[in-house]
Amino acid sequence: MTDELLLSRSDLDFLLFDWLKVDLLNQRPRFSGQDRFDYNSVLNVYESLAKDLFAPHNKKNDSNEPMFDGEKVTVNPEVSVALSAFSDAGLMSAAFPTEWNGMSLPSTVERAGMAYLLAANTGTAGYAFLTIANANLLISHGEKDKVAPYVNAMSEGKCFGTMCLSEPQAGSSLADIRTRAVPTDDGRYRLFGNKMWISAGDHDISENILHLVLAKIPDENGQIPAGVQGISLFAVPRKILNGDGQPSERNDVVLAGINHKMGNRGTVNCVLNFGEGRYKPEGEAGALGDIIGEPGKGLAYMFHMMNEARISVGLTAAALGYTGYLHALDYSKTRLQSRPRGDRNLNSPQIPIIQHADVRRMLLAQKSYASGALALCLYAARLVDDIHSVENEEERHNLNALLDLLTPVVKSWSSEWGLVANDLAIQVHGGYGYTREYNVEQFYRDNRLNPIHEGTFGIQALDLLGRKTRINDGLSIRLLTEKISETVQKGLLIDKLSHHAHKLDAAWQDILQVTKKLHDLDNVEMQLANAANYLEAFGHLVVGWLWLDQAVTIHETIEGSSDSDFLNGKLAACDYFFGWEMPKISSWLAVLDPVETTPLNMPEQWF
Amino acid sequence: MTDELLLSRSDLDFLLFDWLKVDLLNQRPRFSGQDRFDYNSVLNVYESLAKDLFAPHNKKNDSNEPMFDGEKVTVNPEVSVALSAFSDAGLMSAAFPTEWNGMSLPSTVERAGMAYLLAANTGTAGYAFLTIANANLLISHGEKDKVAPYVNAMSEGKCFGTMCLSEPQAGSSLADIRTRAVPTDDGRYRLFGNKMWISAGDHDISENILHLVLAKIPDENGQIPAGVQGISLFAVPRKILNGDGQPSERNDVVLAGINHKMGNRGTVNCVLNFGEGRYKPEGEAGALGDIIGEPGKGLAYMFHMMNEARISVGLTAAALGYTGYLHALDYSKTRLQSRPRGDRNLNSPQIPIIQHADVRRMLLAQKSYASGALALCLYAARLVDDIHSVENEEERHNLNALLDLLTPVVKSWSSEWGLVANDLAIQVHGGYGYTREYNVEQFYRDNRLNPIHEGTFGIQALDLLGRKTRINDGLSIRLLTEKISETVQKGLLIDKLSHHAHKLDAAWQDILQVTKKLHDLDNVEMQLANAANYLEAFGHLVVGWLWLDQAVTIHETIEGSSDSDFLNGKLAACDYFFGWEMPKISSWLAVLDPVETTPLNMPEQWF
């Protein structure tokens, strides 16, 4: 039963085709010749894989987590089977450009498809996500002949990827990494150091693993430079490649320990030691690797991957929220409990709990969060596709500016509210939802990771308020203002939406005003002290905008929409969001203007 | 290290003695002869037990959950050791009246002590809590000679208790229970039926278990009556007592299966079958039991226990929130990461994360939730002590009315915000918090139960808005209004608090107005549709009131308070609550006046 409760295909279709109009992308060379039929076909493949090969071992990934015997890591055999089928179907390289033997599938469609896999089994899907992001970085920033053996092996599912950023003393603060990359005589590097929180860092799924590693090249005195400027990026394979580009000798990178997580247990996560000398590739200790791009630009390149990863985190959270919602909806239709309020007949039968208003409130909240987050993630993916395909440079610059602004929102809002959706899915199930005999508690545990990794909520808030709202002299904010205004103008012309349009406009003006006041403060501590609430307010505003924009699409463009249960449900989710969620914005802004200073001024010893 | 991070003794001392003035209870006969020294001594015992015998196996309770081999349930041996020490110290009967060989300890002090055990090990403490609540019900409603063997055995830790309410088809809807109690010729009953979600339902910790079971007595045609009026309460032991009051023959109640939970795994939770015939006590199938009190009044008696249990649920959530907070605080002082904002020196050392404003925000939020919930629970316990000890009947009536009103808040607010505190404790720990190598993720999983059991959040909301705010012609609300006004009047006279006092007063007036408007609606569906948000708003208001009331106590009565880090920290938590939390009230009220009807009107097929 439950493996069919992954996503709503109607919703995906609406988002992709009616709202984001991905089928119009084929007017541009990169996507020429593609059509809606193709996209539907490929989505069917994702959906089938999700149901047949990913969902069935989701619980097993949770109860049988990866094991490390001191030598090697073993994961459930079903993980390999699922991922092999995934790469055999050509999905690892689905969105790679054709010159890299990809299908050049729009990112929007790829991510919609990946959402099925994430909803079915976040742990197993994680390996594929990391590998795709890894390959995308290599394609963008590597020298083609150097990286081709890896990218090709990745397409075939023979090599998987990781991103190695954090170290025990450097989590959020990447400037403080200490991993050293010492140049060799033949233009390569030997890496020494410890990396923490490495997802998919070691396993037995693929022949090889490619680690993309941030490290610093020591100066002539052997000192590593301080700060982020000294960070370079290296490709360090688990097994070094021989002359034929095939994995051969074991590199000097070993797993030092596995992290035992609350959830998301299917994806192994570990500490990796580089250059501890257990293996001596080409006769010497030190993990052999190649630099990607120029020295000192490692963090910039890694942000390529990290921004993609941040959208993926948002998508993961959205998918988990969505499947939890569908599980709760299903349960609420079959679980009988109590009677309609006011029914005094003690002998009348009990009713399905969906007939209780409070259960419908919890379902609508989940729907508005999960579907809202999915819309947000796909909107971001659509920007990626535009960035890849528009011809005009200024337009691309603007699209990048808008995506930069939205990325912390995509990552954080989806993580936060996807998790709230999972919390409500448990609540709808009552005691049953708290047991491992049902599925929803795992979704909740799996999803709790998402507000933490790839930049915590607090880091995203600083990025949004301290950086993204300011760069390019506020260009990003101006572009978003234009987009919101367009939606507001359209909404004002539609009777049933004009009230929402006014509310959205007023809330956005409030945020703009607060933004300006904060930017005008000279004291940077004051400016950023309550950034978390700024992100909360900003995120709700953005999602409110996208809900209204979808509602406008329904009213403007879809004939007979009032007869459609599905579309009426979308409109109701929009109404819910404006009625129940948008009022929260002013409560978050309350601490920003003027800046409430209790946390800022709290001396440590008062705690 | 971490087993000392349970609760703040300074905070407990403040709450008990400075704020709630429990030491003045000794002016009343029930508590005469007791003093602060006694209370401190007994709190020391709880604290030692918590550190030495409860905390050390908290993780083991989680990783080694109770096992059922088809015949019997096995729990970790440390559970018995801890509980034996607990009852040997006289703590099972600590608050029993002296005529029941108790210490007649005030409930306020007992609960403060129990909070240590809950913070240390919710799973193990759960057995004690249920047993105490069970004994309290027997003492209040049982015939002394019938129940004395059980109560005495409970005092000695030889018999543990359960409450058996839910059935598979009757969770929130107790009117629909089907368990039958068939009278025997000698005035006893034989019970037949299935009970669900029975915590401590079977185990090997004690010689005997007493189940307090809701069941219906069939009419002359063998039909069980519909509705709650037909519910009676029965005492059904696991082993029936022989003539000497000693447990002997096995009763016909057997465990049918264990629930595998997300958290709170230390307390076994199971399905019990009564009267399936595996055992034949006194030669016949059917679980032998005695009725407690009068037929048809079972639910009223059970509410005695349930109201106590609801305060216990709140206390559990508060204790878990508190220990999570202390863990996060400890971590934040030692984890070095990043530099002060504006420090451009790349070589300066990293700082403890508590020096980042956003981390202090998360700590203050946790402090305001956890300590706020603890204050709320102890305030309710203080009302219980007053109810037990005042001489004037009208006063007792009023105290009961106030406690009735606050009980859903105590249960729900603490559960909801204690969990948010645990969520933030994970967030402060970053990736480490998501691993089972640290403690905070378990607190979060353990705490997720609390918004579900003993009446879900939604049920509490209906109870508050539909019942508690209306009974006795609004007496409860009038009494609360008086209490709030007293605090407001005092707060207005203190410079640093007058702003908060105004805010509290305005928010309470808003809630009163909304309450009246809702009560005046003829449509009961409309009235209660958004009860959840009413409970949200009401809960925050009540806790805001108690924070202000504590701040008033500090300003009014404690000399040199401005020199005390601890008291300044309390005042800062109050400031935080008024600055960051109170604004949420209006966002919740936004859907109540006028009633936002999207969830109410949402047809099922639109989802």
Image (cartoon, coloured by chain):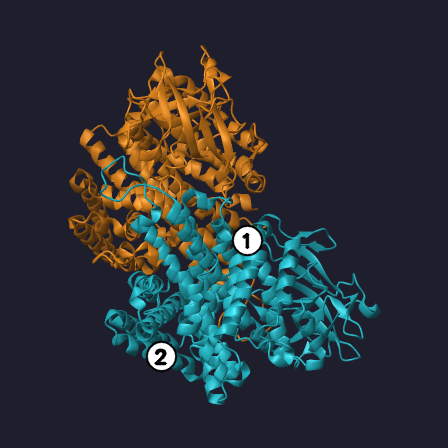
Chain colours: A orange, B cyan
Q: Amino acid at mark 1?
A: Gly
Helix, strand or loop status at disc 2:
helix
Q: Quadrant of residue B430?
A: top left
Numbered label attached to residue B26: none
Residue tagged 1? B263
Sooner in the amino-acid sequence: mark 2 or mark 1? 1
**Label 1: chain letter:** B
Q: Is residue B100 visible?
A: yes
Residue tagged 2? B481
Name the one closer to the observer, B342 or B209. B342
User: Residue A364 placed where, x, y %?
Assistant: 41, 56
User: Residue B80 placed where, x, y %?
Assistant: 66, 58
User: Residue A74 placed where, x, y %?
Assistant: 57, 31
Q: Is there one chain holding both mark 2 and mark 1?
A: yes
Instruction: Answer few, some or many: residues within 10 Å of disc 1's Cα (few below 14, many 20 plus, some between 14 and 19).
Output: many
Q: Looking at the picture, does residue B352 appear above or below residue B43?
A: above
Q: Amino acid at mark 2?
A: Thr
Task: Using the numbered discs, state the Cα–Cα distance from disc 2 to disc 1 in whole angstroms.
Answer: 38 Å
